[in-house]
Image (cartoon, grey):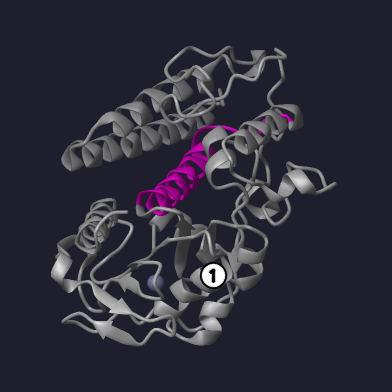
Amino acid sequence: MASEWEVKRQICEVGRRMYEKNFVAANDGNISYRLGDGRYLCTPTGVSKGSLQPADIAVVDDQGKQLAGGMPRTSEIMLHLEIYHELPGINAVCHAHPPHATAFAVAGLELPTCILPEVEIFIGQVPIAEYNTPGTKTFAETILPHLRNKANTILLANHGAVACDQTLEQAYFHLETLDQYCRILLLAKQVGSIRQLSEGHVHELLQLKQNLGIDDPRLHSDAQVCTLAGSDEFLRGFSMQAIAQHTPDANGHGRGAGIAGAESQAGQAQPLPEQTRSFPAVVAGRQLAGAQAMGSSSETARKRAMDDQVERLVHLITDRIVQMAGNGRG
Ligand SMILES: [Zn+2]
């Protein structure tokens, strides 16, 4: 097991990534880790997550009472402890306000499912916990029903998101996956239609997920997997035609070679249904190229420049559609 100092250093690293990704502003957000002897490490209150030092990290007991550390512990510690008390296998919790995910939390819209493979495998269905005043015990308890339903990533109404897992990096990655998903949903709404994966393809993903040792409550339910409950408002007017299931093979996308040895298809041209081969298909190709470049770069400035480029592209497309409509061709 990593030394206490090493875990403190990892908390600082996760904090720096959260700040650079714009998941937190000013002193927002908090991170914690279960040491396993009834003690927990957590970030201090009133310190930017972008400039944390290992010496800043506080130590608390399982009631949130501070045991060590030069600065007062986060005011949100009860939210973290609620997770540790309910889920013994969880060792790390990250809470932030990722803007695209928080937009859905503010709008009170449940995220649609069965759209992106990585989302289905790594975070699954994302519930929204009811709003309550941050920092209170009542607020911490709003996530309880969702923890009992095995959610590892939860939207907090009119507030942000919280994610948990066995390691700090895994918990942080859930926030990244969540915000990227919400961003893609918002972009898709601007440039085209949202197509769901078929029930068959999603069952293949859930099987892969089980093989990876990640449980999903949908595997133990008789209910339809790809529900859109709660998402009607966001999806109104969209093409909800499922993507056709062409082959019987389970070819999943993954993080590197992480998914049961499945070969990654990232970057390969995928056949598109007839109706999407015109203008929107070209748009989708450009969008994909931009998204891949963002994922492979480690330079923050480059990512931000790419963000701007994608945004400009979306505006350009919108302007062209408006112009075409004005010329009687749209
Ligand atoms: Zn917060």
Q: Who's the residue at 41% across and 26% down the image?
A: 256
From the Cβ of disc 1, is ligand 1 less than 8 Å away? no
Where the N terminus falls, by quadrant?
Answer: bottom left
Q: Which residue is mark 1?
A: 157
Bounds of the magenta span?
Answer: 169-198
Secondary structure that dominates the magenta span: helix
Q: Is residue 148 left or right of residue 212?
A: right
Where is residue 327 drawn, in percent x and y? 50, 26
User: Where in the figure is residue 81, as x and y percent of width and height?
Assistant: 46, 75
Quarter of the rendering occupied by the C terminus: top right
**Quadrant of res 272:** top right
Instruction: Residue at 46% x, 62% y: name it.
Output: 161
Q: What's the residue at 59%, 44% (across, down)?
A: 214
* Quarter holding residue 168: bottom left
All told, the count of numbered labels is 1
Q: Is residue 103 above or below residue 121?
A: below
The residue closer to the viewer here, 79 or 98, is 79
The picture places residue 246, in percent across and down from the top left corner, at 71, 13
Which quadrant of the frame does ligand 1 lie within?
bottom left
Amino acid identity at mark 1: Ala
Q: Give the vertical position of 321 relative to 265 (above or below).
A: below
Q: Is residue 153 visible?
A: yes
